[in-house]
């Protein structure tokens, strides 16, 4: 939430800023294009939580395929754990999604705090 840094960008095409994403569990390092809930390059979507979002490097630019929904042109790299706020990637070994993203460590440590039907999913996923 740093408004000043957004204004610092120039109005040329070099406005692209990349955000570094580092998964605290598996060590994945990527640079992503956006962190938040409404990626500007996929304007029709609203994510359920703040995520690290990357433009799909393999997708053609949206204007090339106007029929395709823009939601197909982005990749979710990860999100901050809802409990410990550590950044974790979307890999099934690293995070579990239940209304929000939870890292493996918090899931395992606090599995008893999840509803019963979710506990078995967590245990299965991180077994
Ligand atoms: Zn990871
Ligand atoms: Zn956590």
Image: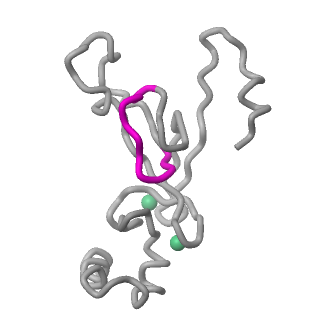
Q: Is residue 99 left or right of residue 121?
A: right
- Quadrant occupied by the C terminus: bottom left
Residue 43 quadrant: top left
Q: The magenta stretch spans which residues?
A: 41-52
**Residue situated in front as seen by the camera: 10 or 26:** 10
Residue at image point 41% right, 52% down:
48
Magenta highlight on residue 104: no
Q: If the image is split into quadrants, where does the N terminus sit? A: top right
Q: Residue at x 59, y 33 (%)?
A: 18
> Looking at the picture, does residue 120 appear above or below residue 75?
below
Q: Is residue 107 above or below residue 39?
A: below
Query: Can you give x and y, in whole percent of width and height, for residue 57 in the image?
Result: 37, 28
Membership of 45 in magenta stretch: yes
Please give left or right for residue 2 compared with residue 67 in the image.
Answer: right
The quarter holding residue 118 reads bottom left
Above or below: residue 50 compared with residue 87: above
Q: Residue at x 76, y 32 (%)?
A: 5
């Amino acid at each position: 939430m740093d408004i000043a840094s957004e204004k610092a960008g120039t109005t040329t095409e070099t406005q692209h800023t990349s955000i570094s994403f580092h998964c605290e569990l598996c060590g994945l390092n990527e640079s992503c294009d956006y962190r938040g809930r409404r990626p500007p390059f996929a304007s029709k979507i609203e994510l359920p939580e703040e995520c690290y979002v990357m433009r799909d490097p393999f997708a053609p630019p949206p204007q090339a395929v106007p029929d395709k929904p823009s939601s197909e042109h982005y990749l979710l790299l990860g999100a901050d754990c809802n409990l410990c706020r550590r950044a974790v990637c979307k890999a099934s070994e690293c995070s579990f999604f239940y209304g929000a993203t939870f890292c493996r460590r918090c899931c395992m440590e606090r599995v008893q705090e999840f509803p019963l039907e979710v506990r078995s999913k967590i245990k299965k996923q991180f077994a």
